[in-house]
Amino acid sequence: MFIRFVTTGGTIDKIYFDALSRFEVGDSPVNTILGEGLVKFDYDVVSMFRKDSLELTDEDREELRRFIATDDAAHYVITHGTDTMVESAQALRSFPDKRIVLTGSLSPARFKTTDAVFNIAMAVAAVQLVEPGVYLAMSGQIFTADNVRKNREENRFEVIS
Amino acid sequence: MFIRFVTTGGTIDKIYFDALSRFEVGDSPVNTILGEGLVKFDYDVVSMFRKDSLELTDEDREELRRFIATDDAAHYVITHGTDTMVESAQALRSFPDKRIVLTGSLSPARFKTTDAVFNIAMAVAAVQLVEPGVYLAMSGQIFTADNVRKNREENRFEVIS
Amino acid sequence: MFIRFVTTGGTIDKIYFDALSRFEVGDSPVNTILGEGLVKFDYDVVSMFRKDSLELTDEDREELRRFIATDDAAHYVITHGTDTMVESAQALRSFPDKRIVLTGSLSPARFKTTDAVFNIAMAVAAVQLVEPGVYLAMSGQIFTADNVRKNREENRFEVIS
Amino acid sequence: MFIRFVTTGGTIDKIYFDALSRFEVGDSPVNTILGEGLVKFDYDVVSMFRKDSLELTDEDREELRRFIATDDAAHYVITHGTDTMVESAQALRSFPDKRIVLTGSLSPARFKTTDAVFNIAMAVAAVQLVEPGVYLAMSGQIFTADNVRKNREENRFEVIS
């Protein structure tokens, strides 16, 4: 099995610069997380954007869609900011033969306590098991792209009731 | 969804006692890991054994099998030592309506660097997606109980070729 | 021995809020760090400010000075943002019988990799060993308040040459 | 300033081998801890023994004493198992011009929660501040070699009353 990881920024990638008291999108922690997970499958990591997900534009989403459309992999895990993860997932719903799982985290991967490892690992398991389509792995659950929303007040993802 | 976690000991649960320079099986880290993962499903944790998996007997496996047979849950994640995880998985292959995923870790969950979080999270995702049956989540992959072995030399799980 | 910890904010206390993609000053990590350090002396923690140190005013420094002047402890560790730690240290130079050590960190204590634990621990050791006066514990070293500066370009504290 | 770190084994260096369910003395974590602490002084790390401190012999202590006697550094931090740290400290009491601080930890440095970072950092601060002599940095305190014991029941170091 081969999984292509595509990183787009978001909280999961956030780092902190003391000199400026600023918090910015940095290198992806995906390689570190897969290393700790002692995974034994083939993969690579493509860095596509470094943006808060509220700053991702329709053009960015179209660029991401085209990248996957013309790329030769069959299994994708996309790390993404949580605020527009659902929008990006829905913009990707058009590949009959590809399994795509989006994930991210509510606290930065570089924090001592973070949901980043858990979410990446869920996405890795899910992309091996699902039918072709687009999914989200967040809040301890696997959602289909057309039946999920972020509940901001409660800081969780949930099925649209 | 409801997941019942059953803990049986193994490396994932190991703790260290300085006064004795001894390393023993302690409380399960499952609750801590699910808390960090910000999971939003219902679950409980049942502590069944606290043993290295090489010390688990046929009677222990039969007790585990009977517990699940008479229990009312449909989704199980079982944490287990890695040395006999495959044997225990195979001893459990008899429930037409239950999804069971065994997992554990190669380094203790209490270590700074550990595969425990990754493996628990894979098991959580897998148990939601698989058909009824018994599975292993290790080495970044999901295996069926009858087609996996631990390769001790390389410290990994792999498909029986 | 009794040590009074006084927290004033700064990078060491920074936390992150996903819903707003914002990084703010939060609760002090001092209690957690002392707990991990298995310390066996008496102490308490007083939260005085929650500010980036660039936002601390002369009035704030005067309030801190008055608090210590009228307080009955003899040993203080003050956590502080790094940008104006030296200014605050110099504003405190007037207590013949008190030992005061300021410290902080260049990355937040809540990060996986942080200098916060190291710096707090140096301050704890130093406050037990120094003559009365005001000191800084940063960059692996103990400085006197009147002979230290932050070198922003190299993100370190150093003796004024 | 230059500090020479000498490692002798003990809990602080413990690592875990899954294949054997065994816990052994491994590489010293001193370099990693100093890196996280963002220290800016010169140092090196000499690995002398890799033993539980109960296994250290009088010959080992004499070898350590001779090493320091003929070595050219003035500041030493020695990491050591806790069970015989006091004995080793007392065996070293004979250098008029050297500052020596022994430290270690009650849980392995590789654990998520450990006193190792705190203790190393206290030792680093202490060795810069003390008069020539031999000291221990444990339990949040700095002790002189001739007035300290390990209280095993309470798992702490304390002054001999």
Image: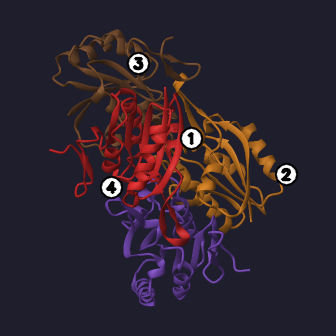
Chain colours: A orange, B purple, C brown, D red
User: In the drawing, does residue D143 fall left or right of residue C12?
Assistant: left
In terms of sequence position, does the residue under pointer 2 or pointer 1 come before the other? 1
- Write the residue at 50% across / 62% down: D16
Q: Quadrant of residue B50?
A: bottom left
Q: Marks 4 and 1: which is nearer the front?
A: 4
Rendering coords of residue D15 (x, y %): 49, 59
Q: Amino acid at mark 3?
A: Met
D160 left or right, relative to B107: left
Please indicate, yes or no, whether residue C110 appears anywhere in the rendered image: no
Question: Can marks 2 and 4 be said to lie on one chain?
Answer: no
Q: Nearer the viewer, mark 4 or mark 3?
A: 4
Dot in front, 2 or 4: 4
Looking at the rendered structure, the kind of residue marked 1 is Thr
Check disc 4 and report its element: helix, strand or loop: loop
Label 2–label 1 contact, CB within 8 A: no
**Mark toward the viewer: 3 or 2:** 3
For disc 3, the marked residue is C85
User: Do residues under tags 2 and 4 come within 8 Å of each other at their CB atoms?
Assistant: no
Q: Chain of mark 1?
A: A
Q: Which residue is mark 4?
A: D83
CA–CA distance in space, label 3 to label 2: 54 Å
